[in-house]
Every structure is written in C-alpha cells, then in structure tokens.
Amino acid sequence: MWKPILRQFQFEYADGYLFWDKAGRVARDLAQAIPGLQLRNQLIDQRDFFLPGSTLELFFGIRLASVSSWEEDGAEFRRKASLLLEILSHELELDALTRFQFLCSLGWPCQTHEEAHALAMKLLPREVTQNLETGEFLGAQLEVRKGAILGTTRYAIMELSPPPGPVRPDALGPRIPFVIASVFHNCFETVPVREFKATAVLEDMEQRFIAEMSKQINSPAL
C-alpha cells in the first residue's frame, strides 16, 4: 500500500523586513511551540532549524519559509506547518502569501524490481509504457496548470530503507525498491493569510492525491 514518505510545505511572502527585528522572537516562539527544536544555522536573511531524533527541518527568512519531514504522521506535520505560518504571520505582520507549495511523496514498497516496474507501469499512460521493459524506466513527469495552480506529478523507482520507520534515501543498511509518486502543488495566486487554513488545505491536497494514486495502482492492467 502507499506509504507517505516525505512532506514539505513552503510559502513566500512580500516585505518581511521585520525579519531583522523579530528573528529572535520568532525563534523563541517556535522553540516553545515545538519542544526540542534547535538552531542549525543562521545567515543574514535566514534561520535554519532541526529537531533532534526526528526528520523535521524548517527555516524562515525575509521572504520565504519552509517545513519538511520524512515522518509518516501527517497530522503532526500539518500542525507544525500551521504553527510556522501562524507565528511568522504574527511576528512579521504578514498580510498575504504571494505563493505556496505543498510536496507530498508516496512510496509503495516492493520485493523485487520486477514488481516495482509492473506497478509503475500502471501509473503511466499506455503510449509511454507499452514498449518499456524492466530496468528501462527511470522516471516520468506530468504537469497540469489550472489558473493560478500548477500541479506537477513525478513517478520513479528508487531504492530506499525498508519499513518500519521513516523511509530515507541516505539511511545505512538494507534497501528495497519503491515505486515513488510525488505531487507538487504550486499556487501562484496571492492569498490573504487570514483566509488560508493551512491544516485543512494540506490535508485535502494529500488525501486527494492518495485517493487518485490508490485508484490508479489498484486498477486492472491494460
């Protein structure tokens, strides 16, 4: 079955000039909201953080912020993403997001490369798959734009650390083949912060993607 392996929420904003005055307060607020959070690096216009014992990473800067995690707990990821947006919008007095992106990567663990290849072929158009043999497929990408939303879906076969636990490409130890499906939702429309419900938006995007990928991979082969 599909296993969520990576999530990232990134958003941009204009005129975050209070960063230089409020970076310390933002860092304090984040550390209080996310116990154990530690500063990894600081640049003139950016602060980077990590959570020891976890795969969570986040940063914020003068015009851009991001949070990512390899953990499976989607609800906890969305809670932290919402906290980051809430704290930044309050301390930096942000009125709107000028752009936001949500990345969700799903992995389907397989026993063999032949199994992974067969499953990957069910996700791609017939005209792409009909002449491909095991070992030839490296990856594919599909882009669809509707108004201010650009959706990019990528497919690949990768060797990753097996379940249980967070799936990591750089982990030591045994590897197994995974079919990877990733979706990038990019919104280029300015969105008022007060109207953007991060938890609900991210959950809706993820659930729609899981439902679509499950439908495709469980459909009979053509």
Image (cartoon, grey):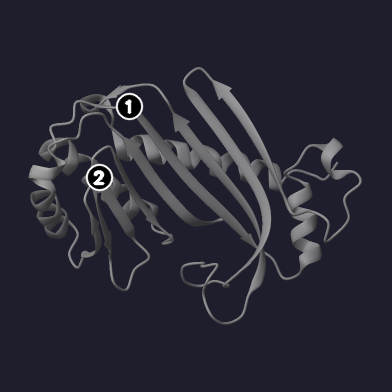
Residue 112 in the image: x percent, y percent? 76, 69
Which residue is at 48% across, 41% downward? 207
Mark 1 or mark 2, earlier in chain: 2
- Looking at the rendered structure, the kind of residue marked 2 is Gly
Q: Residue furthest right?
A: 131
Which residue is at 66% across, 72% downward? 176
The part of the image, by quadrant, that contains residue 72 is bottom left
The part of the image, by quadrant, that contains residue 47 is bottom left
Q: Identify the residue under disc 1.
A: 98
Q: Identify the residue under disc 2.
A: 61
Is 130 situated above or below 190? below
Q: Is residue 56 left or right of residue 110?
A: left
Q: Quadrant of the C terminus?
A: top right
Q: CA distance from mark 1 to mark 2?
A: 14 Å
Which residue is at 50% across, 73% downward? 164
Is 36 situated above or below 188? below
Residue 2 in sight from this viewpoint: no
